[in-house]
């Protein structure tokens, strides 16, 4: 059974608006001899590979940095980024579907990636997704209640 989480995919403008409301600053990443700022809201998922983290961005690009996933997790917005498995952190702005199964809970992201949710973290993950959806709904309601300026 597949459970649809969002009635429609978020537009780029909507993602950027939500990023501002959730206070998602740019992330400064270390490279050989310099640092580079990356917009946090454009990260779809982070994948741990030993002492490195592979970033997957919404435009399809990837970037590897020499920091562990645990170190990166502490730098991300906990309102939007969740860790469903020891090898992945996902951005809930890009969550498309949850696929419950008897054996394994998995999620699909808008870029086509499918990520496993560990059995141990499944109930907490579902609570985080529900909380995120409720916060999105309240942001949407607040935006509708603000009168338009002429």
Image: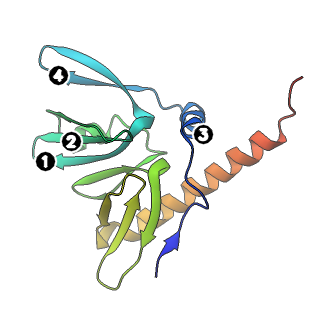
Q: Earlier in the sequence, mark 4 or mark 2?
A: 4
Q: Residue at the spot x=61%, y=61% of the render?
A: 7
Q: Residue at the spot x=35%, y=57% of the render?
A: 112
| Label 2 crowd bin: few (<14), some (14–19), many (20+), radius 10 Å | some
Q: In this view, does 61 lie to the left or right of 101?
A: left
- Which mark, residue 31? 4
Q: Residue at the spot x=32%, y=62% of the render?
A: 114
Q: Which of marks 1 and 3 is in front?
A: 3
Exactly how many numbered labels are in the figure? Answer: 4
| Label 1 crowd bin: few (<14), some (14–19), many (20+), radius 10 Å | some
Q: Earlier in the sequence, mark 3 or mark 4?
A: 3
The local secondary structure at tag 1 comes to strand
| Distance CA(mark 4)–CA(mark 1) | 17 Å
| Distance CA(mark 3)–CA(mark 4) | 30 Å
Q: Is residue 36 above or below residue 1?
A: above
Q: Which of marks 1 and 3 is nearer the N terminus?
A: 3
Contact (Cβ within 8 Å) of mark 4 with mark 1: no
Q: Which residue lies furthest to the top in this view?
A: 33
Q: Earlier in the sequence, mark 1 or mark 2?
A: 1
Contact (Cβ within 8 Å) of mark 3 with mark 2: no
Q: Is residue 102 left or right of residue 134?
A: left
The local secondary structure at tag 3 comes to helix
Q: Residue at the spot x=34%, y=34% of the render?
A: 75
Q: Which of marks 3 and 2 is in front?
A: 3
- Which mark, residue 54? 2
- Which mark, residue 41? none
Contact (Cβ within 8 Å) of mark 1 with mark 2: yes
Q: Which of marks 4 and 1 is nearer the N terminus?
A: 4
The picture quadrant where one finds residue 33 is: top left
Residue identified by numbered label 3: 14
| Distance CA(mark 1)–CA(mark 3) | 31 Å
């Amino acid at each position: 059974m597949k459970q649809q989480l969002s009635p429609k995919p978020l537009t780029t403008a909507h993602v950027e608006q939500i990023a501002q409301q959730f206070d998602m600053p740019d992330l400064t990443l270390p490279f050989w001899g310099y640092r580079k700022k990356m917009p946090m809201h454009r990260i779809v998922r982070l994948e741990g590979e030993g002492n490195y983290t592979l970033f997957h961005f919404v435009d399809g690009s990837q970037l590897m940095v020499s920091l562990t996933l645990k170190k990166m997790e502490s730098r991300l917005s906990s309102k939007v980024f969740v860790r469903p498995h020891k090898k992945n952190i996902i951005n809930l702005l890009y969550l498309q579907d949850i696929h419950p199964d008897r054996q394994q809970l998995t999620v699909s992201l808008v870029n086509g990636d499918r990520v496993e949710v560990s059995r141990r973290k499944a109930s907490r993950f579902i609570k985080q997704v529900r909380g995120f959806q409720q916060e999105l709904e309240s942001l949407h309601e607040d935006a509708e209640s603000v009168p338009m300026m002429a």
